[in-house]
Amino acid sequence: MGIDVLISEQRIKRRVRELAEEISSEYKHKDLLLLGILKGAFIFLADLVRALNIPSRCDFIKVRSYVERESSGKIEIDFFPAVEGEDVLLVEDIIDTGLTINRIKEEIRKSGAKSVRLCALLDKPERRKEEVSIDYLGFSIPNRFVVGYGLDYNERFRNLPYIGVIEDAGVKVR
Ligand code: 5GP
């Protein structure tokens, strides 16, 4: 099973630094709470938080929304931290149909957060089912199933330092 590089490690590093600069300047006078969406965002969040030059706190949300390669559209929240009165920045690996993130945003607003913004590493706009407002975006990508830099295929490939596309016996996956 071969993997083609879609976004190199260098490009990711550069873009993460740029996003961190933007976020640092916009949250300079706030008490930022980064909320990483598990598991896919753990590597992106780790790099992003280390590139910020403002004080911040990190926590995580865990939801179940994806069975193998297709989004079920159903989302179950496994755990969710207290967000009342917080300036929350959601950190997500990829926005696909948009169902998962909109559901999470709704929950955060209902739980009394002061503000909610979204930082996503990747966006696949072609697959959108609901409109999503992305405040900080790494890269917009074509409609392909990607792995690496935290993203998995059946729990594998999360450790790749780049974003890649699986090529299965000559047939590209999605
Ligand atoms: P949505 O609700 O936007 O359809 O689903 C978003 C979630 O689906 C992401 O957080 C991610 O876990 C998963 N997902 C969507 N597209 C891909 C992809 O190309 N590769 C991987 N590994 N996961 C994806």
Image (spheres, grey):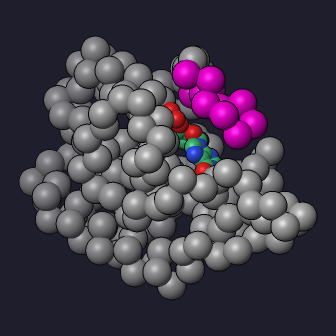
User: Measured along the vertical axis of the image, is residue 29 above or below residue 163?
Assistant: above
* Position of residue 123 measured from the top left corner of the image (x, y, whole percent): 43, 52
> Does 120 appear in magenta?
no
| Residue occupying the point 34% across, 51% down | 119
| Residue occupying the point 48% across, 74% down | 12
Which of the image's four quarters has the N terminus?
bottom right
> Does 70 appear in magenta?
yes
Q: Is residue 92 visible?
A: no
* Position of residue 110 measured from the top left corner of the image (x, y, whole percent): 28, 15
| Residue occupying the point 23% across, 26% down | 113
Query: Residue reaching furthest bottom?
Result: 10
**In the figure, is residue 153 to the left or right of 119?**
right
User: Measured along the vertical axis of the image, is residue 126 above or below residue 147?
Assistant: above
* Position of residue 86 measured from the top left corner of the image (x, y, whole percent): 23, 33
- The dominant secondary structure in magenta is strand
**In the figure, is residue 125 to the left or right of 87?**
right
Residue 69 occupies quadrant: top right
Q: Is residue 70 visible?
A: yes
| Residue occupying the point 65% across, 76% down | 5
**In the figure, is residue 27 to the left or right of 72?**
left
Instruction: Identify the magenta region.
Output: 63-73
